[in-house]
Amino acid sequence: MKLSARNVLKGKVKSIVTGMVNSEIVIELPGGVEMTSIITKTSAENLKLKEGSEVYAIVKASNVIIGTD
Amino acid sequence: MKLSARNVLKGKVKSIVTGMVNSEIVIELPGGVEMTSIITKTSAENLKLKEGSEVYAIVKASNVIIGTD
Amino acid sequence: MKLSARNVLKGKVKSIVTGMVNSEIVIELPGGVEMTSIITKTSAENLKLKEGSEVYAIVKASNVIIGTD
Amino acid sequence: MKLSARNVLKGKVKSIVTGMVNSEIVIELPGGVEMTSIITKTSAENLKLKEGSEVYAIVKASNVIIGTD
Amino acid sequence: MKLSARNVLKGKVKSIVTGMVNSEIVIELPGGVEMTSIITKTSAENLKLKEGSEVYAIVKASNVIIGTD
Amino acid sequence: MKLSARNVLKGKVKSIVTGMVNSEIVIELPGGVEMTSIITKTSAENLKLKEGSEVYAIVKASNVIIGTD
């Protein structure tokens, strides 16, 4: 599937914390930068996510805030 | 300011497209990956963004979707 | 690609309004219900969207508000 | 109340999973399509949601991603 | 309609900027604090928003980032 | 850090509910209005949030829905 979302970053699952409704997925991007995602526990199971899984972190452009020093 | 947002990625502004209400900001991360952000035109002006500006792309973890092949 | 997003609704593009930065895409779902999406103009072009295009409207569960009468 | 949100889809609650902070609400739309929403546990209680409750799934247009095959 | 959204702040429209797709609405809350909202131009027209209109600024709790000094 | 987010409201933490993945933070603004935020449990710990902490509730303008009576 092609997506309108402008940000699709490839990485590997580094760790997973599972709650009753949501799961926290930490993804390591090439170069060592980490991204964290909250998805439903059901989605984490449906995607069979585990440490080392190759994944994409997908972010809609309207959800990116910009900061400056 | 410290933020609860888990994803704060450092980069440089590569290009800006300015509309009547919103502006599209393309940010180049180290390694050449690009992120795109839509912010208000007023915010782009307030932050004095221009090509080459050093910025952070900030994303709340609940806004990160995960995809797998 | 498989997505963590829980809501993936199939439909057809009914109309497109193009701005300088964003485009408004109205999608007709089976049964006649409409959904509206705002994506970047660049994404609408990349996906080659036009009236009648078959598309999916994708929504992360954390972005669905519930209302009651 | 009238809302600026462009997407207001009527349905019935099919199932609820309750966590410590959030609840997952699965809504069945006419025709059998399902939508999933994550709201706070407190909101689910305030709205007195239970299986069979008539509800609206409300989504802001800027939160709808578009995908194509 | 009752909403799951936890944040519903009453105010008055202070100014409107209209683009081709989106409109920027600045709302003044009691005490003088301002909130800014981006909605579709069509929604602004449907709600007949104009300076002085009494409105609610509605925010889902999962969209509130926290910062500290 | 300066942020593109247009809505930055100062307040004090009134209460915290901690789940396994997320925490719910209720913030009291001057004048007694409350705002609720869902952030990750890890962020709440990193920011050392507790009752009485001075915080900012930060909301991107594209995440503000408008309602009218």
Image (cartoon, coloured by chain):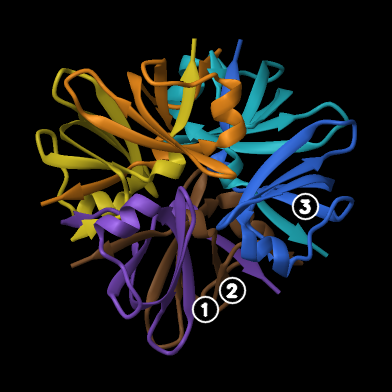
Chain colours: A yellow, B orange, C purple, D brown, E blue, F cyan
Tag in front: 2 or 3: 3
Tag 3 residue: E56
> Hey, which quadrant is residue F24 in on the image?
top right
Residue shown at 58%/25% (left/top)? B45
Residue shown at 74%/23% (left/top)? F11
Q: Earlier in the sequence, mark 2 or mark 1?
A: 1
**x and y, in percent, of residue E29 in the image:** 84, 39
* Left or right: where F18 falls relative to D36: right
Element at label 1:
strand
Residue shown at 66%/70% (left/top)? C68
* Left or right: where A11 falls relative to A4: left
Tag 1 residue: D12
Q: Is residue A15 above or below residue D59?
A: above
Task: Write down the chain letter for disc 1.
Answer: D
- Relative depth, front residue between C69 and F69: F69
Amino acid on which disc 2 is placed: Val
The N terminus of chain C, quarter of image: bottom left
**x and y, in percent, of residue F18 in the image:** 52, 32
Task: Write down the chain letter for disc 3.
Answer: E
Q: Residues within 10 Å of mark 1 (few under 14, many from 20)?
A: many
Q: Does mark 3 fall on the same chain as mark 2?
A: no
Q: Is residue A18 above or below residue C62?
A: above
Count all numbered tags in the image, as a single digit. 3
**x and y, in percent, of residue B46 in the image:** 61, 22
